[in-house]
Image (tube, rainbow, N blue to C red):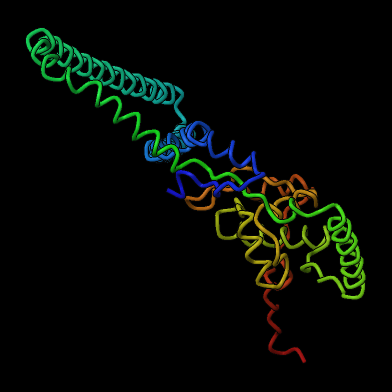
Amino acid sequence: MEKIFPTERAVPGQRLRIVTTLLWPVTGLCTGTPVLVRKLMAPRHQRRAEAAALTAKREQLAADVAEVDLAAFAKKLSAEVDPLKRAALVNDREAARITVREVEVEQLSAARKATFEKAKEAAGGAALLLVLGGPLIWSLARPWIGPGVGLLVGTWWIAALIHAPSPVPKTSAEDATPADTEHDDEDDQENDEEDADDDQDEPHPALPPTLTDTELTTTVEHMVALRARRDEGRGHVHLSELLIALKRHDRYCGYTAREFGAAVRAAGLPVERRVRVGKDVSPGLTYKGLQAHLGHPPRLPAHAVPQPAPEPVPAGAV
């Protein structure tokens, strides 16, 4: 009962509390109904969100497969020298794409037809049941319609009152006199001044160490050049990989991926939105983009540059 009628017992002189208590059945119904509806619809919204996430993932996988297939076809087409065979390959691929689309259209048409047939059968059964059993069902259910509606409305009303947000009780600060409020303001001002003096005395914590724009550019250049030696010259590096590597050397320790990306862009480096490393696609940098930005190929660090082999000394030389 305290949840359904959360106001306190009225005492003489508190008319507002009396009015609030009297109007609570109406105000509680108005404020609790949206909360109850959201709670009842939450499982459906969750299922729809999960279905949308699965659909997006399936579309992403299909796009990745199509991208890989297109790259393989482009490689095969570039390796073909005969122009007639190249044209035949293009025509075969287009015919296969049209065939697949026709099959998809036929499947969709068959699914719609099956759905329509099921709906027609259900409508026919419902109509037959209504014609044959309608009078009997009405004669049996008619005495229970009024009590059932009343029970349903009463149950909904009580549930709405239970889920309605409780009125905010009046705090002691609202009951304070103007003189008490003035004293509290003076005390708060004094406390604020003391806190400000303490802040001036105490040193502020130092920001996590970072790199200058030049140092960051050199570091990124070295990492892209090293990666290019292992991925056939593409030099694809994600921003997350850069941040992890720098954190190992106590740099950008307090930065998130978004903040580090903003710092890299502020340094003028050409960050690309979709860079593929293995199966992962994420913002990052590439050898080609960095080369266009720097005006020269990314250089390896000094310890990774291969040294020329020493020339053999003749046997008779001293």
* Closest to the observer, 117 or 75: 117
Viewer-side residue, 151 vs 109:
151
Up the image or down, 299 lies above or below 204; here it is: above
Indicate the position of residue 236 as horizontal and vertical percent values.
60, 52
Q: Is residue 157 visible?
A: yes
Image position of 154 with respect to 188: above or below:
above
Left-right relation of 216 to 70? right
- In the image, residue 99 above or below residue 249: above
Residue 167: % across, % down: 58, 44
Q: How many marks do you count on the picture? A: 0
- Name which residue lies at 82% across and 71% down: 206
Query: Which of the two residues, 96 or 25, is positioned nearer the viewer here?
Result: 25
Q: Quadrant of residue 131?
A: top left
Left-right relation of 214 to 313? right
Q: Residue drawn 61% across and 42% down? A: 17
| Residue at the bottom extreme, as displayed | 318
Give x and y (percent) for residue 146.
25, 21
Extreme residue in the front direction: 12
Assign the C terminus to one quadrant of the image.
bottom right
Say which residue appears at 49% left-offset and 40% top-offset.
164
Residue 124 at x, y percent in the picture: 14, 10
Dividing the picture into quadrants, the one containing residue 226 is bottom right
Tell me if I can see residue 72 in this picture. no
Q: Is 293 or 105 nearer to us in this picture?
A: 105
